[in-house]
Image (cartoon, rainbow, N blue to C red):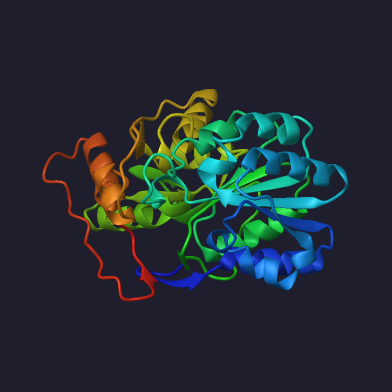
Amino acid sequence: MREPPYPTVLKPYGEALLEEARRRPELLCLGADLTRQTETDIFRDALPERFFNAGMAEANMIGIAGGLARAGHTVFVNTFGVFCTRRCYDQIAMAIAYPALNVKLIGFMPGLSSPGGPSHQAIEDVALMRSLPNMLIVEPSDAIEIRQAVAALAAHRGPAYMRLKRGEIPVIHEHDHPFDLQHAQLLVGGRARSDACLVAAGMMIPPALAAARTLSEHGLAVTVVNSPVIKPLDAATIVSAARASRLVVTAENHTVVGGLGSAVAEALAQHALAVPLVRVGIADVFAESGSREFLFTRYGLDTQNIVRAVWSALGRGQPVPRAPVLETPPGAYAPV
């Protein structure tokens, strides 16, 4: 695993989708007038006969995807997360999830990664998709996992939803990083007793790792679990790490209602594990417009807030350790 600030790459999803399509002639790509923004211009230019632009009609696009899947195709549907979940939820439920069709919904700009305010910030998409039977949910943390996830989703039979950051994508993991659709991964610790277990996914992995580093420098043993598959949750790995910890903290770029934190809470309760749980995420509010740095700090998704959550829940008292602010050179990515 690399150290921050992380190197970045552009369009790893678009490249991975084209690579997978060249191996799988049944794979088709659908879009809704956001081709460049969803990295599918690469697919369109290379395989135009297998690319379909449905225009700004997402609900109709879901119906088209369902029909193509019934005809034997593997269909990747690409747009912003709010548009492929909130806008056409009933179509997804009836045309994709209920018949368990081979459609992969790819939602860009998760949570507060969008500067566009409530109309463009997918803060409840995981909660919506979690409630649908048959729906797999994936949230990769970097370019390596994105490539691995595309291949895994293409091979998976059935509906899935994957949320992806736009723009420069960090490279956090090494190329031999283990990834599959069944397991979470222990990124830090996990071999002995720990003071806190941090469970995170997607864009919250960098701040979780940075928080663990700061906390360890101040005498706390911290485990970090990466849960790129939110449904079905790898409860075995998370519960095992939680059993060895005094505290569990979940970190998600999503409302604390119905997302990763809720899934972890359900797993702990089902295993009768009486360990304190703190959920770091968007506190059941609509956010405003702004940069990732501004929004993550304002709504408590930054490294410092994770440090504060652990320190306070363990009763360590003041002062709370200060997480260092990393200088980010051009072309690099650092946790907020």
Residue 89 vs residue 326, the one in the foreground: 89
Q: Position of residue 336 (x, y in %)?
A: 30, 57
Residue 51 vs residue 209, the one in the foreground: 51
The residue drawn where x is 29% and y is 71% is: 328
Q: Position of residue 38 (x, y in %)?
A: 57, 59
Relative to 115, say whether 328 is above or below: below
The residue drawn where x is 31% and y is 55% is: 291
Residue 220 in sight from this viewpoint: no
Relative to 10, say whether 160 is above or below: above
Looking at the image, the residue that sits furthest to the right is 71
The residue drawn where x is 22% and y is 56% is: 323
**Image side of residue 27 versus residue 226, left or right:** right
**Image side of residue 205 versus residue 30, left or right:** left
Residue 201 in sight from this viewpoint: yes
Residue 120 vs residue 314, the one in the foreground: 120
**Where on the picture, by quarter, is residue 102?**
top right
Looking at the image, the residue that sits furthest to the left is 319
Relative to 214, say whether 227 is above or below: above
**Image side of residue 143 versus residue 327, left or right:** right
Q: Position of residue 239 (x, y in %)?
A: 51, 36
The residue drawn where x is 73% and y is 36% is: 96
Residue 323 vs residue 61, the one in the foreground: 61
Relative to 299, say whether 213 is above or below: below
**Image side of residue 223 versus residue 295, left or right:** right
Q: Position of residue 288 (x, y in %)?
A: 30, 42
